[in-house]
Image (spheres, rainbow, N blue to C red):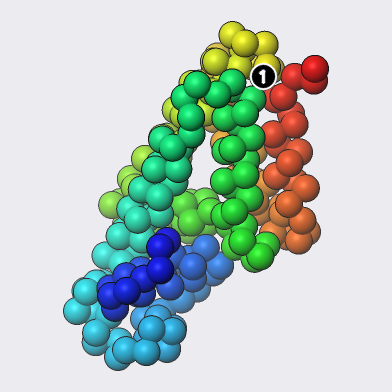
Amino acid sequence: METPTTVREQILDHAVTLIMLRGYNGFSYRDLSNLVGVKTSSIHYYFPSKDDLVLEAVNVYSNEVFNALHGVDASLPADAKLSKYAKMFGRTLGDGSQICLCGMLAADIGSLPDTIRHAVQAFFKANENWLAKVLAQGAQEHTLAVNGKPENAARALFAAFQGSVLASRLFHTKARLDDVEATVRIAR
């Protein structure tokens, strides 16, 4: 997120970070209150419930990711687009202690309301759709190896990216993320 200026933006910024570090059930309004320096009642003013806050955090996070995807130069070859995508996932790791916000929430999905589940599903589907287009382009250019339909390969690839950030966090290395990209790249 950009440097937050309003109390609402600061709350969202910290909520995104806490969700990426601890998940839905791993933070409270009291945690946010301490980080932002406001009373919990102030947080309730902006976000009456935790579900409201988390849904807005998902929307903000998703928009940032989608803007980054739309910012990838369409004229690039597919393997270069995939490299940019992998780097984007690497930035998600930060210092190695956090994972994709929507990936973290997917693990908590059993305790989340339908509105958040649908927002997380939309995030996954949008990433898979983008990857499917890149994989189809890569198959046509012979720069990426695609077995089967690009849509199916994209779902598997996105799942591999999500899993790689979990493993990268576990082992404190981004090498797991690099391994995912390498699995579809055709050596030249």
Depth check: give the residue in front, 115 or 110.
115
Quarter of the image holding residue 31? bottom left
How many numbered discs sit on the rendered protein? 1
Q: Is residue 35 above or below residue 77?
A: below
From the top left corner, tell me how far across and down residue 53 is, in percent: 31, 67
Residue 181 visible in the snapshot: yes
- The quadrant the C terminus occupies is top right
What residue is rendered at 80% in x and 20% in y? 187
Residue 156 visible in the snapshot: no
From the top left corner, tell me how far across and down residue 179 is, in percent: 76, 38
Direction from residue 52 to residue 87 in the image, left or right: right
Direction from residue 175 to residue 28 in the image, left or right: left
From the top left corner, tell me how far across and down residue 110 is, in percent: 43, 56
Direction from residue 110 to residue 107 in the image, left or right: right
Q: Amino acid at mark 1?
A: Leu
Using a 10 Å C-alpha cutoff, classify the residue at mark 1 as few (fewer than 14 neighbours), some (14 to 19) or many (20 or more). Answer: many
What residue is rendered at 59% in x and 37% in y? 84
Q: Is residue 13 above or below residue 153?
A: below
From the top left corner, tell me how far across and down residue 111 is, in percent: 41, 61
- The quadrant the N terminus occupies is bottom left
Q: Is residue 71 above or below residue 47?
A: above
Residue at mark 1: 144
What residue is rendered at 56% in x and 67% in y? 21
